[in-house]
Image (cartoon, rainbow, N blue to C red):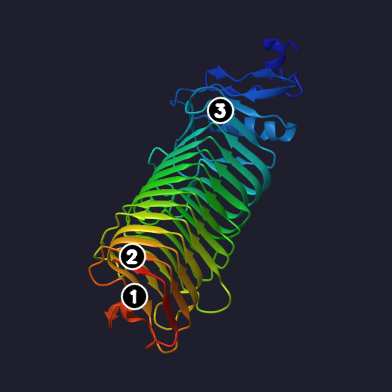
């Protein structure tokens, strides 16, 4: 199919798009069996908001992708409609914030795809709750192979959104890299999230899958979920964190935390505030190393902390300046099983709450070595009491069963 310049400029092509961009013009090109709209970059010097918005609207209405050639596009907030698809040259098609606010906003839409873009907030003020990508009430949002950098607030903010973020780089973010609330069916996978002033990923939503990501150099947690049932944190690498690396709290029932690598954090994994109902969690096959104290935090230096309805199995914890594994918090202990874990070089291997109203716990077949204050100790609050239960047994405490552990 041949399209000459005159036809494009006169708007005579049904699926094509001509967009004025300052002194330069957009054009259309044929890719396979469909047309792709394009906007020419302005070098970051001119305001291209109107041109980009018109191009995105027309492309969405006609079902064509909007392609952004390599270059810098200076823009304000672009509002994306259902069916919008914007693609660029990975690492080279740069949307740069012109005047603050979200770069891309999506509201009450579905099937929106972003691929191969660099979204640069340029450290301009975004507002207290703003983000580079801000989406609300959206289904099937797809962000793939994009870079999000230089946000003075959040990287990606999602409310009531389903979809996935994959193969992205999110860095130099003042608050959370990705924040999701009241969403369902969200996946964040195979992305690198770094240098965040908050959490790498923060979720208050159900059925999220967070897998295969590298999350590093964040002020707080790598992944934090609250009131987020049936969430899965699997195969993530979490390094150099100012808080607990992986946290699930407040009725985050059905949580699975498996096969993650954690190094240099104030805590490895915490599953807490399961005060009522059945909120079972599985913490399995994680490697946790080289934890450190943070003296302005109440709890720090532990490998794994669980309160209720949890199976903790097959984990390796090495270098915990406090407890390798902490079980329960006063009466908030119920049906916990700790089995087949390996703990080395912790201050105390395993601490278990013996509050009179606490539920049951079974500690079995764990290997514990190199501890300074015992392999298995009863806890009153945060204080170890009594003898080493790995040696003396736990007959004194009605709620604790200890057997077949190896301590050295």
Identify which residue, 242 or 71, lies in the foreground. Answer: 242
Q: Which mark is residue 88?
A: 3
Q: Which residue is mark 2?
A: 368
The residue lying at 48 percent from left, 83 percent from top is: 359
Res 16 → quadrant: top right
Tell me the CA gap for discs 1 and 3.
Answer: 60 Å
Label 1 Cα neighbours within 10 Å, binned few <14 / some 14-19 / many ≥20: many
Res 253 → quadrant: bottom right
Identify which residue, 194 or 120, lies in the foreground. Answer: 194
Q: Which of labels 1 and 3 is toward the front?
A: 1
Q: Are marks 2 and 1 in contact (CB under 8 Å)?
A: yes
The residue lying at 75 percent from left, 19 percent from top is: 13
Whichever of labels 2 and 1 marks the residue nearer the N terminus, that label is 2
Q: Which residue is mark 1?
A: 390
Tell me the CA gap for discs 2 and 1.
Answer: 9 Å
Whichever of labels 1 and 3 marks the residue nearer the N terminus, that label is 3
Tell me the CA gap for discs 2 and 3.
Answer: 52 Å
SS type, badge 1: helix
The residue lying at 56 percent from left, 59 percent from top is: 231
Query: Residue 115, position in %: x, y?
Result: 57, 34
Q: Which of labels 2 and 3 is toward the front?
A: 2
**Depicted 282 relative to depicted 403: above or below:** above
Identify which residue, 117 or 305, lies in the foreground. Answer: 305
């Amino acid at each position: 199919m041949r399209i000459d310049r005159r036809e494009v400029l006169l708007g005579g092509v049904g699926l094509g798009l001509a967009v004025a961009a300052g002194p330069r013009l957009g054009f259309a090109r044929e890719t396979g069996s469909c047309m792709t709209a394009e906007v020419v970059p302005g070098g970051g010097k001119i305001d291209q908001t109107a041109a980009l918005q018109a191009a995105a609207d027309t492309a969405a209405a006609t079902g064509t992708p909007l392609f952004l050639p390599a270059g810098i596009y200076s823009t304000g907030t672009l509002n994306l409609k259902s069916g919008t698809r914007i693609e660029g040259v990975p690492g080279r098609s740069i949307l740069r914030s012109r005047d603050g606010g979200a770069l891309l906003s999506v509201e009450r839409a579905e099937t929106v795809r972003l691929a191969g873009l660099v979204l640069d907030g340029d450290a301009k003020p975004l507002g207290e709750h703003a983000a580079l990508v801000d989406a609300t009430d959206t289904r099937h949002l797809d962000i793939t192979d994009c870079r999000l950098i230089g946000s003075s607030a959040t990287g990606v903010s999602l409310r009531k959104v389903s979809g996935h973020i994959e193969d992205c780089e999110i860095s130099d973010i003042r608050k959370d890299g990705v924040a999701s609330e009241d969403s369902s069916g969200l996946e964040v996978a195979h992305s690198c999230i770094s240098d965040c002033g908050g959490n790498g990923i923060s979720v208050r939503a159900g059925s999220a899958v967070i897998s295969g990501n590298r999350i590093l150099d964040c002020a707080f947690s790598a992944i934090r979920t609250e009131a987020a049932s049936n969430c899965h944190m699997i195969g993530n690498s979490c390094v150099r964190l100012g808080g607990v690396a992986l946290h699930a709290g407040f009725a985050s029932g059905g949580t699975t935390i498996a096969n993650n690598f954690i190094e240099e954090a104030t805590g490895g994994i915490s599953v807490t505030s399961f005060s009522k109902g059945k909120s079972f969690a599985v913490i399995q096959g994680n490697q946790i190393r080289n934890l450190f104290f943070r003296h302005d935090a109440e709890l720090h230096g532990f490998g794994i902390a669980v309160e209720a309805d949890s199976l903790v199995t097959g984990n390796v914890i090495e270098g915990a300046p406090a407890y390798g594994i902490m079980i329960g918090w006063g009466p908030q202990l119920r049906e916990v099983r700790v089995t087949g874990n390996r703990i080395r070089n912790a201050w105390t291997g395993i601490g278990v709450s013996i509050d009179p109203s606490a539920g049951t716990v079974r500690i079995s077949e764990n290997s514990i070595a190199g501890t300074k204050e015992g392999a298995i100790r009863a806890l009153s609050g945060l204080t170890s009491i009594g003898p080493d239960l790995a040696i003396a047994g736990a007959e004194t405490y009605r709620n604790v069963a200890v057997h077949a552990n190896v301590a050295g």
